[in-house]
Amino acid sequence: MKTKGNLTPKVNIVTLGCAKNLVDSENILTQLRGNGIDTTHESEKAEANIVIINTCGFIDNAKQESIDTILEYAQAKTDGLIEKVYVTGCLSERYKDDLEKEIPQVDAFFGTRDLPLLLKKFKADYKQELVGERLLTTPRHYAYLKIAEGCDRPCSFCAIPLMRGKHISQPIELILQQARSFAKQGTKELILIAQDLTYYGLDIYKKRNLAELLDKLADVEGIDWIRLQYAYPAGFPLDILEVIKNRPNVCNYLDMPLQHGADNMLRKMRRGITRTKTEQLIDSIRQQVPEIAIRTTLIAGHPGETEGDFDEMYHFVEKMRFDRLGIFNYSHEENTHAFGMEDDVPEEIKQERADTIMELQQIISSELNEKKIGNTYKVLFDRKEGGYFIGRTEADSPEVDNEVLVDASEQYVRIGDFAQVEITGATEFDLYGKITPSH
């Protein structure tokens, strides 16, 4: 059992939710260690006497996972296994008052922009000089680079602006400073994230400035891949396509959550775009960058979604043949615009619709993967698991997309290295291959 009042804090940070949260946890880790405090991230060992939980509050499942995690550590505190529990992140920002009442064992709750206040609990200062020097919790060869915080979009279903506030772009110089620092540490892939990448620059440069940022990042020595995640379709800055096409280290990859394929639903979701305009946009992206892999996300069962709307979405997916696709069940979130509508699609219908879309995507993905057999791709290897070296092509983001498997009993590759791989087999979501000698 831990003794109370242990003077040397040993901190463990637990992260839930998306890559944007992971970046926030890495910033907490960097600041605490920079202040000389012994800090780990997701440590398996039960050595910490203080736990910081970085929560997600996006949809029901994520909220439940966050609450369960808080309760688990609150119980550990009651049992004398740890001394303090701090909670930060999106759930804490959104439900602080309720959580304080419901889980009094937690020592303090912090919002998404309260890092200096959290540091005060450790008598630590927010060190400005550490801003470009983030410690990574991902494998060293790839890093998430958050280029903006918050969101100004009015989407009906989304609680992110409530938790993350208005859109704030990071200045180009600061982003470049971080990119150079990562490159020095051996990072080869930068994954650009924000709630909305395509809005980048409007607040500080008075224009959409993603193309200029990409161009400058592509000049950073040592960075082989730059990947774009979370681009919004309405007002899409087409000038970024030139950069994707002309700069070899900007991946032929675009993650563009479209949410639906029926006009009626796009209007209800307040997406600011029609199905026709969406199709035209995708066509022009594919024309300008023929090699591009497009990933999208959809929502099943938003209030007012009829069978007809769902059929329209199904045909939209069938027609567009996205390289990658995920689908969420609609979650009724208080204080969002859609919360004023009746959540009128039963849970089992939402699930049925989501499953139907995923079955269709499985067929599309399988057909697209079959066509890759016999081709050779540049692959970045992330890990070794179950007798295979597992990597990704430029068409794949970590955690969410397809993977390339190479038999470790036959061939060897260093984790974090690139290799040319000839594809010898394919399933719905994975490719199998052999490393070919580099010429």
Image: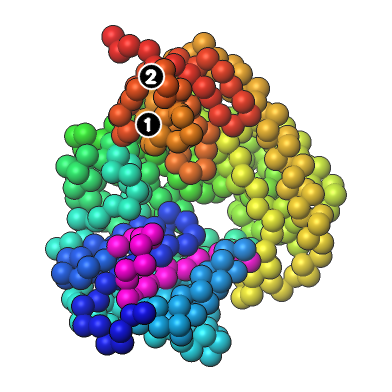
Image quarter (top left, top right, bottom left or bottom right) of the N terminus: bottom left
Mark 1, residue position: 381
Image quarter (top left, top right, bottom left or bottom right) of the C terminus: top left
| The image quarter in which residue 382 lies | top left
Q: What stretch is highlighted in magenta?
A: 40-60
| The image quarter in which residue 325 lies | top right
Using the numbered discs, state the Cα–Cα distance from disc 1 to disc 2 in whole angstroms.
13 Å
Name the side, left or right, on which 263 lies relative to 401: right
Crowdedness of circle 1 by 10 Å Cα count: few (<14), some, many (20+)?
Answer: many
Q: What residue type is labelled 1?
A: Phe
Q: Is residue 47 magenta?
A: yes
In the drawing, what numbered circle is on residue 411?
2
Eye-nearest disc, 1 or 2? 2
Q: Which residue is drawn at 49% across and 13% down?
A: 375
Q: Which of 355 and 262 is in front in this view?
A: 355
Residue 239 visible in the shown view: no
Above or below, 5 against 384 in this view is below
Above or below, 413 against 19 in this view is above
Q: What residue type is labelled 2?
A: Gln
Q: What element carries label 1?
A: strand
Q: Does the magenta stretch include residue 24?
A: no
